[in-house]
Image (spheres, grey):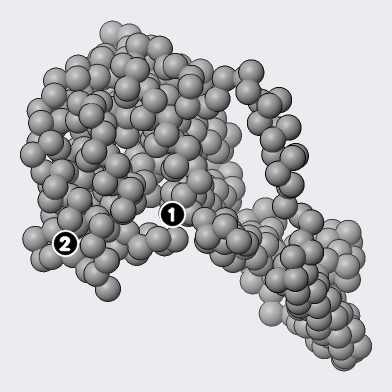
Amino acid sequence: MLNPRRRRTILVVVPLFFVLVGQLPNLYLNVFQDRGRASRNRSAEQPRRARGGAEVPPGFVAAHQYVPPLWVANGAMGLASGNAWPALWHTGAAFAIGALGLGRAYRSTIRFYQGKDTSLPSTEARRKTDLRSGTRKRFLERRLPAIPEQAAALSLAFFRSMIRAPEVRMAVLMNLIMAVVLSVIFFARSRRTPEEFVKPFGAAGAVGFTFLGMVQLLFNQFGFERDGFRALVLLPIRRQHTLIAKNISFFPIAIGVGLVVLAIVASAIGFSVLVFLAACLQLIAMFLLLSIAGNYVSIIAPYRIEAGSLKPTKAPLKTSLLIFFAHLLFPVAMIPILLPPALAWGIEKLGWFASAPVNASLSLLLVAMTGGFYWLSIQGLGSLLQRREKDILQVVTREIE
């Protein structure tokens, strides 16, 4: 907790963990069990009957006595049957656990201020570790194929900064949580398998959903730099290389989240290999399209993000309107992604070819076209960044509450 970045990450992850744990019974009872008709019987003789009449496994009920997050439900179940002892025992145990935690925190704090903290590695241990790792190639010393050396080094630095930033972790984690929860809610209850012509559109929708929660990261690439943007201004590299590095650093995160979302949707509705391959190509194409739009919006409408959160500071009305319309027009970026499955469905209706190979072929063509547009745009956007970098510096380094 001495590291501010680690402290902010813990403050983000711990509440999300408890929210997810608290929602597990709700997901189990309302999604994975057949609901049937809503049961109004709350008699004490049937404590193991879930809502809708579904039988809860005995092991799940027994776990309520030993797992601390489930103690509240176990106490409520005991009170419903007229037995107050479980609630009292669990309340006392919760207070005891809290007292032990506070006591340990107090003792560790005293040891730290008295100079008795031995958890930190000594200088000699750090020196031995550095000597052992000296022969290995460091992360920032790696080379990326077909990428200029300056852009490759800067992209690796950006990537390391992003995976350690609590704001990026928060955005990515919330996107994954929403993908899992919505997929469970919409697909786990349905027993009907979608028609074959619907599945490519479902895959394209999953691609669009992947980037829906990342628009703020893509359209405000310099707002998270804050005071660190001064280093980018002082770097003697071409500004288009800076934009390329920004996009490359975000590529593994976007593709990783997209593959997870596609895997969830594929397991729910069942994709063929060609449909999944087409969806992966559409994922790359949409990333390139949003990178072009994100580079432009990040240059003309930057705004500072508070450290440890996704909350923007007070922005001028012009910037706020540009941000609003940029987010509002996000569905427009999905039109090119929907074209391959739509054209493939039309060609299959005409009886010319099967839709799956046509969808994959058109998706590959879409990747080539978006890659060409990206390469043509990066030179002009780099010049625009060079003209506006001082204005961006003034915006992202100024603290306005």
**Percent coordinates x, y for residue 141 in the rendering:** 48, 22
**Percent coordinates x, y for residue 93 in the rendering:** 86, 80
Image position of 224 (left or right of 234): right
* Residue 320 numbered tag: 2
Image position of 322 (left or right of 203): left
Q: Nearer the viewer, mark 1 or mark 2?
A: 1
> For the point 13% across and 54% down, which residue is it?
322
Q: Amino acid at mark 2?
A: Ser
Q: Secondary structure at mark 2?
A: helix
State how far apart marks 1 and 2 are (Cα).
Answer: 20 Å
> For the point 29% across and 19% down, which residue is it?
367
Q: Amino acid at mark 1?
A: Glu
**Percent coordinates x, y for residue 61 in the rendering:** 85, 66
Residue 348, visible in the rendered structure? no
Residue at the far front: name it: 124
Question: Measured along the vertical axis of the image, is residue 393 above or below residue 8?
Answer: above
Q: Which of the two discs, 1 and 2, labels the residue nearer the N terminus?
A: 1
